[in-house]
Amino acid sequence: MAPPIATTATAVKREAAWLKTSGDGLPGLLESAGGPFDIVQAYLQRTPPEVRSLYVLRSRLVSTHFAAVRRMPKYRFLLRVVWPIRDPQGEAEDDQQLLDDAVELVLARITGFTHDKTHGGRFLSVGETDEPTVVFADPARTMYDFNALTCDITYGADDYETVG
């Protein structure tokens, strides 16, 4: 597969496409592929539905200049996980465990294959120099304020070099 046209404007959509991929030996994340999420998509919706969601965002872009005329864009991806509480009167521990299980699958997908960290040729490397970090929101707040659990997963990616 030839690498897609690599521009900083397409990075979020390229990463979302990788996270939606299934049938390649890594965990599928969408429910239709046996995964835990109803939605895996680039960018937040204005009014997000109350379903298990994984949104791909970008929190940082740095264009590193080297070798006189070469540039390499570097990103810090931010995955926002929204995990609605299924039964507000039920056992909250069950939903928290399901979120932990879902995060484990996301981390496996980000980490990728042992000898290929390009996310299927979409990037030069992902999750190598800026390793995945998960920050869980306080469930005591989010369960009562939003009837959901949330966490953010951040990690880095190096894009293909450009001349400029």
Image: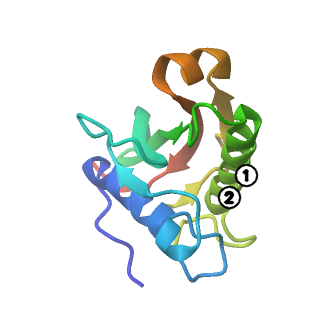
Amino acid type at mark 1? Asp
**Going 59% across and 38% down the picture, which residue do you hit?**
153
Q: In front here: 155 or 152?
A: 152
Task: Estimate the x, y position of residue 154 in percent, counting from the top left.
Answer: 58, 37
Residue 17: quadrant of the picture: bottom left
The amino acid marked with disc number 2 is Leu
For image coordinates 29% across by 54% down, the residue present is: 10
- Neighbour tally class for label 2: few under 14, some 14-19, many 20 plus, Cα within 10 Å: some
What color scheme is it? rainbow
Q: Are marks 2 and 1 in contact (CB under 8 Å)?
A: yes
| Relative vertical location of residue 160 with respect to residue 155 in this rendering, above or below | below
Residue 39 locus on image (x, y percent): 41, 55
Q: Secondary structure at mark 1?
A: helix
Residue at 58% in and 70% down: 28
Q: Position of residue 114 (x, y in %)?
A: 75, 70
Which residue is label 2 attached to?
Answer: 105
- Residue 121 appears in view: no
**Is residue 13 depicted above or below 149 in this figure?**
below
What x and y, as percent, mark residue 90? 67, 36
In the picture, the quarter occupied by the N terminus is bottom left
**Within-10-Å neighbours for mark 1: few <14, some 14–19, many 20+:** few
Cα–Cα gap, marks 2 and 1: 7 Å
In the picture, measured across the screen, residue 66 lies left or right of residue 127, that is left
| Residue at the image point whose x is 45% and y is 58% from the top | 38
Q: Which mark is residue 101?
A: 1
